Image (spheres, helix red, strand yellow):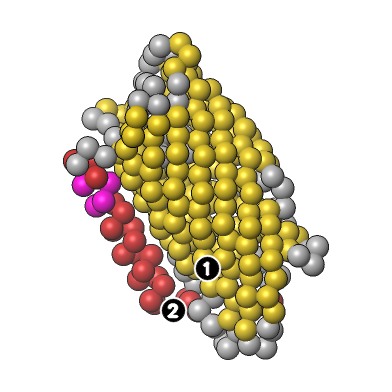
Amino acid sequence: MRIKKSPSSSPFRLAAAKGSVRGSSSNPPLWPRSGEGGVRGGFFCLAVVLLLTAVPAAHADGLGAAISYARYSTDFEFANAATENADIDELGLTIGESITPLLDLALQGGYTRLNMDNHPAADGYDLTGRFFGIVARTEPTLIPAVLSLRIEAAYRWHDVDNGRLNGQYDELTWYEASLRVGPVLSVGPVDVSAGGYLEHYDGTEKARGPLAFRRDFSAGSAGGAFATVALELGDGGHIGVYAQSGARQGYGITFSSGF
């Protein structure tokens, strides 16, 4: 497998995405709201610093690394047949390496924030927490130095809560499995890729306080399409942009080192 040196919507590349919002009047701000307290804001700032220092350190050790900021909109379908739109921000670190010429593996983790409009159990505030996952990718060459086929599978765990604001506690935990497939066309320092994806959510919401309940949820829809344009910057660095539609609507800017 020819190891591509460009980012994509893959978590192997630093992904910073901003999703279109369905069913809401505005996107949530990047910084935690004041009602969430200085602790969460401080954690966010610390995470940014740690991720920015971790990427060059991993690259120096011969590993591929990426930091990621992703923003997207998706639907959660709850067990009572209600569907709610969720706007999600993720700031994460991915570190991986080639296990064989045909297989790359990576671990990832980071900060997650979720906002749902008209969701009483969240008491009007964002839910924040963390995510962890594993990603596997193969990219066989179809035409040397021109065309390859990227196939990527990922499995991630998310957990967010509202910090028991005003006596109301709300927590969402979900597992996400996804598969992405698409060709990659290389034209000099530019890579262009487009394809499709499938994803599956399996999650639970738990609320305690004035509102107390437990309910399961899954993805409101199962798949969509994506497109990526990436530019090689030299010395192992890359920058790219991508957009996606369907089950997960978003767009972003990507940075990476060593991939």
Specify the segment rendered in magenta: 53-57
In percent of the image, x 47 and y 67: which residue is there?
Answer: 129
Look at the image and tell me in which quarter the C terminus lies: top left
Instruction: Decide which of 253, 110 is in the foreground and name it.
Output: 110
**Identity, as a three-letter code, of the amino acid under mark 1:** Val
Q: Is residue 56 magenta?
A: yes
Task: Give the numbered dot on residue 37.
Answer: 2
**Identity, as a three-letter code, of the amino acid under mark 2:** Gly
Q: Earlier in the sequence, mark 1 or mark 2?
A: 2
Q: Is residue 16 visible?
A: yes
Q: Give the quarter of the image for residue 14.
A: top left
Q: In the displayed structure, would residue 194 be above or below residue 159?
A: above
Q: Which residue is mark 1?
A: 160
Left or right of 102: which side holds 198? right
Q: Give the quarter of the image for residue 5.
A: top left
Q: Main secondary structure of the magenta part?
A: helix
In percent of the image, x 44 and y 13: which residue is there?
Answer: 146
Q: Residues within 10 Å of mark 1 (few under 14, many from 20)?
A: many
Q: Is residue 48 magenta?
A: no
Look at the image and tell me in which quarter the N terminus lies: top left
Image location (x, y in percent) of residue 163? 50, 79
